[in-house]
Image: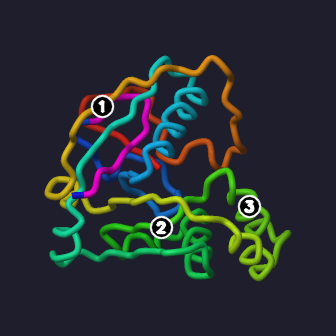
């Protein structure tokens, strides 16, 4: 079992795969990470951007063995390479390449890399220039669970922690990175995202 985390503005015991905005790195799905600090940063950032009083760290167990044994379509990007760049750019431009998969894992287009991607998408960088900049970045990790059946069979809610809000204001990145998962006006006991 892999421990994974989801940063949010609410506690999410029963996640839903289709509750997010479109045009994210790996498409529409429930995003988690195996990097606790990454999820904590995301929860705090999301609360700050959305002017919410609470930030939550949701903790789950993900049975990757079952995910790999059953006939799920799993895509994994090991590095920030040409395949990752092409896939993320296509998804952010609204192409639904993600719909061919049940689960996608790989680096996130976070503060460290989003500017390069934005400049590439605007045409300010060539593909080669963008890749030259990305090659020096150590990928963090995100898992996008697209298929609700995987959530229901393989993802088990463990616990959630209400995070203390920091006294220092968070540095809010550009609009392309401010909401990795869809905006929710109300938190309900059965929904929501991360990384």
Can you identify the residue that label 3 sits on? 118
Mark 2, Cα crowd under 10 Å, few <14 / some 14-19 / many 20+, is: many
Q: Residue 3 lies in magenta, yes or no? A: yes
Left or right: where 92 falls relative to 53? right
Q: Residue at x 70, y 64 (%)?
A: 117
* Nearer-N-terminus badge (3/1): 3
Residue 124, horizontal then vertical, whole percent: 85, 69
> Which stretch did the figure color magenta?
2-12
Find the distance from the CA under tag 1 to the CA under tag 2: 24 Å
Q: Nearer the viewer, residue 2 or 21?
A: 2
Q: Is residue 88 above or below residue 179?
A: below
Residue 140, horizontal then vertical, whole percent: 53, 59
Q: Is residue 19 above or below residue 146?
A: above
Can you identify the residue that label 1 sits on? 160
Mark 2, secondary structure of its residue: strand
Q: Residue at x 41, y 53 (%)?
A: 33
Mark 3, secondary structure of its residue: helix
* Nearer-N-terminus badge (1/2): 2
Find the distance from the CA under tag 3 to the CA under tag 1: 33 Å
Front of the two marks 3 and 1: 1
Mark 1, secondary structure of its residue: strand
Can you identify the residue that label 2 sits on? 106
Find the distance from the CA under tag 2 to the CA under tag 3: 18 Å
Quarter assignment of residue 120: bottom right
Q: Residue 8 lies in magenta, yes or no? A: yes
* Nearer-N-terminus badge (2/3): 2
Q: Which mark is residue 71?
A: none
Quarter assignment of residue 184: top left
Are the residues flagged by discs 2 and 3 in contact, CB closer than 8 Å?
no
């Amino acid at each position: 079992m892999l421990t994974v985390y989801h940063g949010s503005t609410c506690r999410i015991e029963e996640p839903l795969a289709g509750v997010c905005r479109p045009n994210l790195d790996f498409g529409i799905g429930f995003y988690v990470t195996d990097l606790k600090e990454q999820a904590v940063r995301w929860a705090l950032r999301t609360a700050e951007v959305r002017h919410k009083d609470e930030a939550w760290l949701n903790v789950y167990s993900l049975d990757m063995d079952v995910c790999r044994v059953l006939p799920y379509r799993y895509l994994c990007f090991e590095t920030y390479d040409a395949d990752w760049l092409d896939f993320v750019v296509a998804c952010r431009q609204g192409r639904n390449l993600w719909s061919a998969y049940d689960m996608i894992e790989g680096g996130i287009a976070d503060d460290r890399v989003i500017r390069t991607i934005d400049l590439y998408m605007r045409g300010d960088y060539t593909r080669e220039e963008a890749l030259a900049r990305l090659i020096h970045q150590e990928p963090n990790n995100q898992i996008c669970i697209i298929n609700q059946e995987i959530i229901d069979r393989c993802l088990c809610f463990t616990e959630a922690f209400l995070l203390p809000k920091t006294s220092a204001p968070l540095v809010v990145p550009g609009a392309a990175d401010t909401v990795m998962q869809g905006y929710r006006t109300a938190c309900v006991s059965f929904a929501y995202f991360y990384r």
